[in-house]
Image (tube, helix red, strand yellow):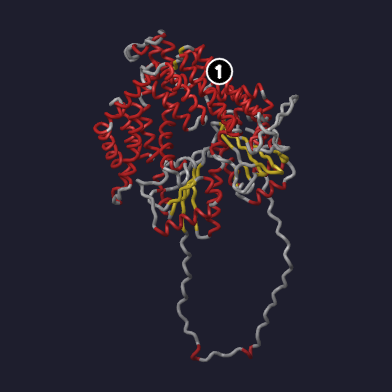
């Protein structure tokens, strides 16, 4: 395997002025070396990682990075910018930019090399050497570690006069001690014992597990050394796996620091100690404050119980001071995010079963009793029955992971139990929502009860599951189950009765929701509403119409942006035109997020245009009576769509509307100050750019 960085991957005069342009310039060097197979696909992965959290760090560093299936081997490219590029760091632009590309299945050894770079970036001498380097080959060698960073040259100091050597006094001047003043010899006083160090154990992790994980670890360890009386042991939970801190080290620790952006694995090992729980960038930027904060907690005697370990998955992903409404939305989205893969797998298998075996395949006997390898209907029945089993997990998974978002792992048992009961009593999707929220609340309530030390060990595995499952089961079976089941039936009957103008209005509303935030919470609400309707063995015709309208509307924004960059490219920057090429595929695949780069750059024009087209498509799909049994797939499941020709017309109409609106809005832009114009397409007149005020 070749070196991770070579001279060809170093640009000491990086001329890019945006982080997107910088990533592209460095990625092009990787592609030229054959290390990136699909430039646009790789840049989309880099942008997706950047959207999770800015990769700018204090000290003038930008470190965009990702794992991607378009990378052939672990690769690092380095660029140095004279003017600096904004990567979102609190202290300003970055002049040292590292683009780290790791394959989807990168081996541990190379990820370890990448982590060592992250630690080097905390060394001021290393950064100074990079800023003064003049040779690309030498810079690559320095980054690889082949050449040590030069020692800083000390400033010349003024010559200090040599201290005068004291002459011994003449013997005559020495007085003889009197007998009464003669000291009585005694035992020597023992040397004072060194003060015991304050011991901290820490865990660091980031979404990719390549850079920030190890930089936070190095920063915390360095802050501990600088404090003098603090000893910090860090467990890095990175992409290369993690080596657990020994139980003895954890037991001897006085406090714990969690600096992470993904859930800490096996977090209960650290229960019972003063804890500070923050994001990974806090571990990089203010390690000294974290150490001081956790020492203060230890001095006050604040500890974390095993049952009430702070930082549920939702709390870890949020920020301090979030309101109850924000947390409620995140709890629900936690359940939805775990449910969607079951929806996709089950729905596509059921749709495939219908496509192979016909629409009477749901009446086929069990494949355990009747399966012929050479019979098409048997394969159709097999796919259909696997899909039905997958769909059977939807409500329990939804309820279980809502409770998980609220109360972490202790919420899983009552959540799954409550979700299964919701299915048993025909409370459906609404019952799953209620069961998940109740289960999470019950567990949180149990965790607040003071438990004797002797019982804490069995709380997570015996007491909490037993009590919470019993309470949730009682409430679902006896108290609230029947009203929720009635509400679910009423909603189903209402959907089945939608016709004419009511159906078109619903399609319009769902289209607006799908295009409002392009994969965000509002989009997910509409999508979940649609998938809940088809998550049964025999969904109603109305439910399949809703699913068709939702998928069609979700395809509009990226397809419209792709078309707009094609027909009026001069209205878009070079980067946006490149993103437009990828948006064709993303839109056709029903990935609404393909329009996010355009919306992020110009939300006041792109989002209204997307919503207009989405509303038209949703309304037309419902008016045409198009149906869809599969919850995903885009144009690849058109053969499974009812009225496929009219369905494609609905999508095309919405795409044309969105394209026309965004072109008109961008064409009405005011002239920007000189230097702020969008980059023009060669051979075309330059259009006025968006003004900053817009």
Vertical side of 334 occupied by 357: above or below: above
The residue sitting at 55% across, 17% down in the picture is: 653
The N terminus appears in which quarter of the rendering? top right
| Numbered circles on residues, count | 1
Q: Residue at x 36, y 17 (%)?
A: 538
Establish if 21 lies above or below 611: below
Closer-to-camera residue (558/470): 558
Instruction: Inspect this view and state whether residue 140 appears.
Output: yes
> Residue 438's quadrant in the figure?
top left
Percent across and percent down for residue 679 are 70, 31
Q: Quadrant of the C terminus?
A: top right
Along the line of sight, the residue nearer the viewer: 211 or 334? 334
Q: Residues within 10 Å of mark 1 (few under 14, many from 20)?
A: some
> Left of 693 or right of it: where is 208?
left
Q: Position of residue 502 (x, y in %)?
A: 42, 20
Residue 348 appears in view: no
Residue 117: which quarter of the image? Answer: top right
**Residue furthest top in the image:** 375
> Looking at the image, which is closer to me, 315 or 201?
315
Residue 271 location (% of width, % of height): 39, 48
Provide the residue designation for mark 1: 653
Compared across the picture, whether 156 is left or right of 230 comes to right
**For the residue labelled by badge 1, is the local secondary structure a helix, a strand or a loop?**
helix
Task: Give left or right: position of 268 versus 649.
Answer: left
Q: Is residue 381 left or right of residue 72?
A: left
From the top left corner, tell me how far across and down residue 450 is, in percent. Answer: 30, 50
Residue at the left extreme?
478
From the viewer's side, name the closer residue of 199 and 547.
Answer: 547
């Amino acid at each position: 395997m070749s070196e991770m960085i070579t001279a060809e991957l170093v640009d000491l005069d990086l001329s890019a002025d945006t982080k997107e342009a910088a990533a592209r310039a460095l990625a092009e060097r990787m592609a030229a070396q054959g290390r990136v197979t699909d430039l646009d696909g790789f840049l989309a992965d880099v942008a997706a990682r950047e959207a999770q959290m800015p990769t700018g760090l204090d000290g003038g560093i930008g470190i965009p990075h990702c794992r991607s299936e378009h990378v052939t081997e672990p690769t690092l490219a380095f660029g140095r910018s004279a003017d600096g590029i904004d990567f979102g760091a609190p202290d300003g632009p970055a002049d040292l930019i590292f683009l780290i590309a790791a394959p989807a299945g990168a081996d541990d050894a190379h990820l370890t090399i990448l982590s060592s770079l992250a630690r080097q970036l905390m060394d001021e001498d290393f950064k100074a050497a990079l800023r003064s380097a003049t040779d690309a080959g030498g810079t690559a060698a320095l980054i690889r570690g082949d050449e040590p960073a030069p020692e800083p040259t000390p400033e010349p100091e003024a010559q200090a006069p040599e201290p005068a050597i004291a002459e011994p006094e003449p013997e005559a001047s020495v007085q003889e001690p009197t007998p009464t003043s003669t000291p009585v010899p005694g035992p020597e006083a023992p040397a004072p014992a060194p003060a015991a160090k304050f011991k901290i154990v820490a865990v660091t992790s980031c979404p990719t597990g390549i850079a920030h994980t190890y930089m936070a670890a190095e920063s915390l360890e360095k802050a501990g050394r600088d404090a003098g009386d603090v000893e910090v042991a860090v467990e890095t939970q990175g992409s290369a796996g993690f080596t657990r801190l020994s139980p003895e080290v954890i037991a001897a620790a006085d406090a714990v620091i969690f600096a992470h952006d993904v859930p800490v694995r096996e977090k209960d090992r650290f229960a019972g100690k003063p804890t500070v729980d923050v994001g990974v960038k806090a571990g990089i930027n203010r390690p000294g404050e974290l150490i001081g904060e956790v020492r203060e907690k230890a001095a006050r005697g604040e500890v974390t119980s095993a049952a009430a370990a702070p930082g549920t998955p939702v709390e870890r992903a949020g920020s301090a001071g979030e309101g109850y409404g924000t947390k409620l939305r995140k709890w629900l989205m936690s359940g939805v995010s775990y449910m969607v893969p079951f929806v996709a797998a089950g729905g596509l298998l059921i749709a495939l079963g219908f496509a192979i075996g016909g629409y009477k395949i749901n009446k086929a006997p069990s494949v355990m009793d009747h399966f012929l390898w050479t019979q098409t209907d048997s394969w159709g029945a097999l796919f259909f029955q696997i899909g039905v089993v997958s769909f059977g997990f939807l409500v329990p998974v939804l309820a279980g992971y809502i409770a998980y978002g609220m109360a972490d792992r202790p919420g899983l048992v009552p959540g799954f139990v409550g979700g299964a009961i919701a299915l048993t009593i025909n409370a459906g999707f609404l019952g799953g929502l209620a069961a998940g929220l109740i289960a999470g609340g019950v567990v949180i309530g149990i965790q607040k009860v003071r438990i004797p030390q002797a019982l804490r060990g069995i709380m997570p595995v015996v007491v909490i599951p037993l009590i919470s499952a019993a309470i949730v089961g009682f409430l679902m079976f006896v108290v609230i189950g029947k009203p929720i089941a009635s509400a679910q039936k009423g909603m189903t009957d209402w959907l089945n009765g939608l016709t004419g103008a009511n159906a078109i209005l619903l399609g319009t509303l769902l289209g607006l929701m799908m295009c409002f935030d392009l994969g965000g919470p509002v989009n997910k609400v509409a999508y979940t509403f649609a998938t809940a309707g088809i998550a049964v063995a025999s969904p109603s015709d109305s439910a399949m119409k809703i699913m068709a309208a939702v998928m069609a509307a979700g395809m509009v924004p990226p397809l419209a942006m792709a078309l707009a960059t094609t027909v009026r490219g001069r209205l878009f920057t070079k980067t946006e035109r490149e993103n437009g090429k990828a948006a064709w595929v993303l839109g056709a695949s029903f990935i609404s997020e393909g329009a996010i780069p355009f919306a992020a750059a110009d939300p006041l024009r792109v989002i209204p245009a997307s919503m207009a087209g989405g509303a038209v498509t949703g309304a037309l799909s419902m008016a045409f009576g198009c149906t869809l049994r599969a919850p995903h797939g885009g144009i690849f499941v058109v053969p499974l769509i009812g009225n496929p020709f009219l369905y494609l017309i609905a999508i095309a109409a919405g795409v044309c509307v969105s394209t026309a609106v965004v072109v008109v809005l961008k064409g009405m832009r005011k002239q920007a100050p000189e230097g702020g114009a969008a980059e023009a397409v060669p051979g075309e007149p330059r259009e006025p750019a968006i003004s900053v005020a817009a």
